[in-house]
């Protein structure tokens, strides 16, 4: 019911149900965008959300839920410099490919850690 909640002004945080579902924020966001079962059936087409809203539900939404949105959840001056760096821009690719986007690395406390060096 993501689309309905957002339409009503509810701040959402979505997450995985690992180990039942894959532990992957982009997979979770893709599920909210497509609402497709493992067999390909679409459930609740009217509850689909767009890419920007889906990304917000795995970033700023959880930060808001934790009451830490002043510190984390988005890249802004004054916030912690802790975030993942993706290999593609999720807002510019085909939404069908969202869960395939790779991780280039992370930034923690302003220090860059490329995944290739991990």
Image (spheres, helix red, strand yellow):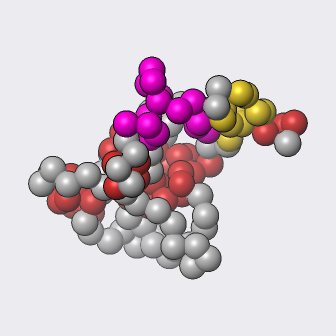
- Horizontal side of 80 relative to 108 (left or right) equals left
* Furthest residue toward bottom: 20
Q: Report the span colored magenta.
A: 70-85
Q: Where on the picture, by quarter, is residue 22?
A: bottom right
Height in image: 115 above or below 2? above
Residue 80 locus on image (x, y percent):
53, 32
Is residue 82 visible from the viewing direction of this image? yes
Overall secondary structure of the magenta section: loop
* Furthest residue toward right: 117
Q: Which residue occupies 50% across, 36% down?
A: 90
Residue 48 locus on image (x, y percent):
30, 57
* Furthest residue toward top: 77
Q: How many callouts does the rendering have?
A: 0
- Horizontal side of 84 relative to 11 (left or right) equals right
- Horizontal side of 61 relative to 2 (left or right) equals right
Residue 76 lies in the magenta-colored region: yes
Q: Which residue occupies 15% across, 50% down?
A: 9
Is residue 33 visible from the viewing direction of this image? no
Quadrant (top left/top right/bottom left/bottom right) for the N terminus:
bottom left
Residue 88 locus on image (x, y percent):
60, 32
Residue 71 lies in the magenta-colored region: yes
Camera-nearest residue between 115 and 87: 115
Camera-nearest residue between 102 and 70: 70
Q: Where on the picture, by quarter, is residue 60?
A: top left
Quadrant (top left/top right/bottom left/bottom right) for the C terminus:
top right
Q: Which residue occupies 44% across, 37% down?
A: 71
Q: Which residue occupies 51% across, 73% down?
A: 17
* Furthest residue toward left: 8
Residue 3 locus on image (x, y percent):
23, 56
């Amino acid at each position: 019911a993501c689309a309905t909640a957002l339409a009503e002004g509810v701040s959402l945080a979505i997450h995985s149900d690992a180990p039942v579902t894959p532990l992957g924020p982009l997979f979770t966001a893709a599920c909210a965008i497509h609402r497709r079962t493992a067999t390909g059936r679409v459930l609740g087409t009217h509850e689909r959300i767009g890419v920007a809203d889906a990304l917000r539900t795995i970033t700023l939404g959880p930060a808001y839920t934790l009451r830490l949105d002043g510190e984390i959840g988005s890249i802004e001056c004054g916030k912690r410099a802790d975030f993942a760096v993706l290999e593609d821009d999720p807002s510019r690719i085909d939404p069908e490919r969202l869960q395939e986007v790779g991780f280039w690395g992370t930034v923690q406390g302003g220090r860059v850690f490329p995944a290739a060096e991990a």
